[in-house]
Image (spheres, rainbow, N blue to C red):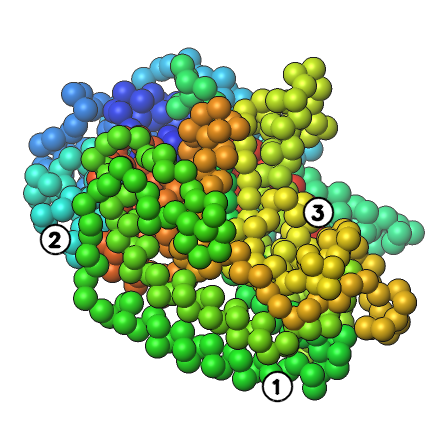
Amino acid sequence: MAHAVLHHPFVRSIGQGTLPLPLFQAYAAQDAHFLQSFAKAYAHAMTKAEDPKTVVALSGMIAAVVEELELHSSVLEEEGGMQGESCKGGGNGCATSSNSYRDTRENAANGNDVAEESRQETSSTTTTTIPPLIPSPACLAYTSFLISKASSPSSSIAHILAALTPCMRLYAHVGRRLVEVVEEGMAEGRERGAGESLSIPTIPNVGEVPASSSSSSFPPSLRAWLDVYSSPAFEASAAAVEALLDTEAAKEREERRRRREEEGGMEGWQEDEERREEEKLFSLYLEAMNLEYNFFAEQWERGREDWKGYQPILLVTDFDSTCSLSDTTHLLPKAAGYFKGPEYSLSKWEELENAYLAQLAQVMRPLLEGSPLSFPPPSSSSSFTEGQGQDAAAPVEATSFFPPSSFSLMKERDLAAAAAHLSPLDAFDVRAVESVSASNLLKGIDLSLLPGLLLSSTPLSTSSSFVSSLALQPHCAPVLRYADALVSSSSSSSSSSSSSSSSSSCLPNPSSPFFFHVLSVSWSSLLITTATGLDPSRVTCNQLESEGGREGGKEDGVRSIASPDEGGREGDSKGGESSTGKIKVLVDGPGGKLRHFRRLQAKAAREGGREGKTVYIGDSVTDILALMAADVGIVVGHSETLRKMVKKIGWEIRPLLAFPVEEGRREGRRAVWAARDWAEIGVFLFGRRGAEVVGEGEKEGGREV
């Protein structure tokens, strides 16, 4: 849910400096009303406290809330959209208020008696004025939740803190992440030079007043908000509340143990009681997180539709090291070793792998270090993607997938130059696959038993097994399953308006067309379908051929998940068709991925009846052209080679959190977007429902295969 809050347009607009002042002031007024109830909840907790240290800590936290209200007071007093000179003079709500806030926060975090003294001094010297207002539905729901839980005789201090802590932790997280993005934008702006401006406004170092006109465009109220919630003092305060929650929960747990010992004969109840108490704390925490999201969302969605994420019409992802934890290619020669004996494959594989890496370095060095790219003038044709390599008889339609604009022409020109520049890598990939085919290294794999082997705990080494080596990135599996369900839902809705899939009620727009595909240079679709559970129709990659002429024989071997045993080795009557060792090249490097991605774009536009937003997710240089061709290219992982190549082409890699809320602001920006993990991707694509999908995946537990 933290990802959902962080990526919500309202919150991102704060970090991008584009949130209109009236909208921010409306939020600040509601938040000020909320903070008064927040302080009352602390006060209720204090009435239940018997430990003097707990009383001191809670009183300091109340004092800190009073200081936090200073920020809201200054925002509500702004007129005309800026504070202007009042900030430069260090007036109320600017640097002076921020410093006072930090002092109080630090004292509260340390549990010092000075916190109370600071609160008294603040009360007598500041003029915090919050105008009366009618709380919004989301605000009223949140404050009612806090007060009802805090005032209930059955609520313990730990219960109250479990309801209060999410607000502190979430604001500290959001403030820090937003400032990281702003500071990265500033660094890139300095690197690119003053001649090129970033589409995201830059601000000075947090806590400082802008000295130049170029930075003064960032609204002071938003700057002050970022200053407060990204500060080390606020982080320390959030940590202090968390620590107090842990302390109180431990004290209450010890009190329950002591009570059970006194009453006697209740040993069997202990485990159930502790589990119920833990579930209660988690339930309060989760309910507060949901109320936090609703609070932010309500400010943005008045008069608008609910935010459902980016909602592309086409989603395409790479597999190895994008979805999987690591490259899975090595599993095929190891599978051959299982069926034929380790001595058959492992030494050959090591020899081929070393040769591949050495030759790849020779190919990449001139691509990264050579002369700058030559950018051709824009052309109405897309000849650089047509009929290259495999399937030359089926060229990509020449229709442009970009609307007519200077940015579109620039992007198409960049793609043409990048495709020409990377063509040696396409040829190298083909030669590398041909060398594996020629070695017969992969001959003799029983493809009907391969999925079961991949899902088994059969050891690969002392530290890994087949199934552990096939594991997916955290949160990837639920996002892929949801995308797959979305395809099925949109297909069933288009075929019959009266019927819907069982999961359609959980989908954002089940009646809207949606297309999802995995596009990989992997040598076997069985690896991908076994790891993800996707239907083979959702996967395009190179193919390990079988004696029957296609991977997996008559049944394709995709749905067979029986665990192999000694009787399943080659020659046993239970076995299926064996691999010939040959690999059919269908996806030849970056150019091949671009070619297939454009076909998928054409399919989505044709069958969906419209040209919609497209997303590609990848992690390496082989993905770079598809990343550029998509409306949004999302990078996962930390490939330095990919980053260097993106820079050489003249593009940027920006945090996904920096993706503009107002898409018109993307004009002129040549960028792909880096995600921290698949949870962030899920939220970006599908909004709050994406966060729920990830949460449901976490509840399921187990491995990510």
Q: How much space separates mark 3 and mark 2, taking CA atoms?
A: 49 Å
Q: Nearer the viewer, residue 182 or 566?
A: 566
Q: Nearer the viewer, mark 3 or mark 2?
A: 2
Mark number displayed over residue 700: 3
- The quadrant of the picture occupied by the C terminus is bottom right
Residue at 34% in and 40% down: 659
What amino acid is found at the position of numbered circle 1 in the picture? Ser
- In the rendered image, residue 653, in percent from the top left (x then y), is placed at 32, 52
Tell me the tag on residue 318. none
Residue 111 shown left or right of residue 151 in the figure: left
| Residues packed near mark 2 inside 10 Å, few (<14), some (14 to 19) or many (20 plus) | few
Give the SS element for disc 3: helix
3D distance between C-alphas at marks 2 and 1? 52 Å
| Mark earlier in primary sequence (3, 2) | 2
Query: Which of marks 1 and 2 precedes in the sequence?
Result: 2
Residue at image coords 31%, 26%: 24
Which residue position holds label 2?
A: 193
Task: Give the CA separation, mark 3 to mark 1.
Answer: 40 Å
92 or 515, which lies in front? 515
The numbered disc on residue 347 is 1
Q: Does residue 485 appear to the left or right of 125 in the view shown?
A: right
**Residue 636 visible in the picture:** no
Residue 403, image x and y in percent?
Answer: 30, 30
